[in-house]
Image (tube, rainbow, N blue to C red):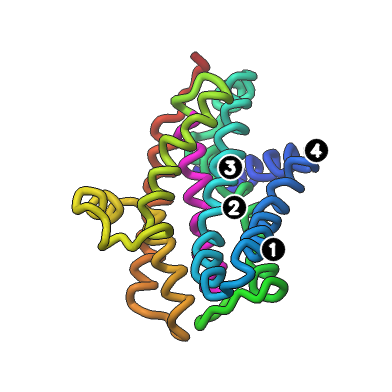
Amino acid sequence: MSPARTLATARRVLAQLRQDPRTVALLLLVPVLLLVLLRYVFDGDPGAFDRVGSSLLGVFPMITMFLVTSITTLRERTSGTLERLLVMPLGKGDLIVGYALAFSGLAVLQAALATGVALWLLGLEVAGSPWLLLLVALLNALLGTALGLFVSAFAASEFQAVQFLPALVFPQLLLCGLFAPRDSMQPVLEYASNVLPLSYSVDGMTEVLRHSSITGDYVRDVLVVSGVAGLVLALGAATLRRRTA
């Protein structure tokens, strides 16, 4: 890997995103609008909004970054751009990490905007530091980016890329403890939830919601989410094809 080539890849992706301001606007604003909607859904129960809203600050970045990354990468593959890039002296690691850096930069803006609106405009109350919430949100965005890069290798069209969302993300959403405590699920479902990264993201958000200082469980949750993101990025580099099928 070459830092110069990696940064050049990140700059190229960001330049392409700047040419599509509507996509960028939707990426930044949709999570905020959904949080506003959720706030008024729970208008009579602020405690429920604190519990659910803090968890969704980690869920929304993962879903949106998964979609935009998988579709963008697939579009470059089907148009032949990816094949032309890999013919050049550009390693797979340079390409994958460059994409991850570019989309992570966008994720910083998305997560910061959603977290700021939730805390200071919508009245989300947490015991811990807002920076701890932001860290988990950013790691989830990186995880979504890594998953999007990974699944784009197995999709032949943008429609197929979108179909990976219910296949990979929705089961995690159902089992992460957002809708029901994980220890109240059937044993096989509880075991499955214990190996899914989104479960640890929700647990990390819950730790910030309940505790004023960093706990050992929070550190564990952050390490698990970041470790899975790094592993999936490595798998994405390993499955990246130099030739378009």
Q: Which residue is mark 4?
A: 19
Q: Amino acid at mark 1?
A: Leu
Q: Earlier in the sequence, mark 3 or mark 1?
A: 3
Q: Amino acid at mark 4?
A: Gln
Magenta span: 131-152
Q: Quick one: label 4, few (<14), some, or many (20+) residues within 10 Å?
A: few
State if disc 1 and disc 2 touch (CB < 8 Å). Answer: no
- Cα gap from disc 4 to disc 2, whole angstroms: 18 Å
Decide: is 174 above or below 139. above
Q: Which residue is mark 1?
A: 113
Q: Earlier in the sequence, mark 2 or mark 1?
A: 2
Q: Which residue is mark 3?
A: 99
Badge 1 element: helix
- Cα gap from disc 2 to disc 3, whole angstroms: 8 Å
Q: Nearer the viewer, residue 50 or 116?
A: 50
Using the image, tell me which numbered label, if any, was put on residue 104.
2
- Cα gap from disc 2 to disc 1, whole angstroms: 14 Å
State if disc 2 and disc 4 touch (CB < 8 Å). Answer: no
Q: Earlier in the sequence, mark 4 or mark 1?
A: 4
Q: Nearer the viewer, residue 60 or 238?
A: 60
- Give percent across and percent down for residue 232: 40, 44
- Give percent across and percent down for residue 89: 56, 30
Q: Main secondary structure of the magenta part?
A: helix
The residue that appears at 56% across and 24% down in the rendered structure is: 159
Badge 2 element: helix
State if disc 4 and disc 3 touch (CB < 8 Å). Answer: no
Q: Amino acid at mark 2?
A: Ser
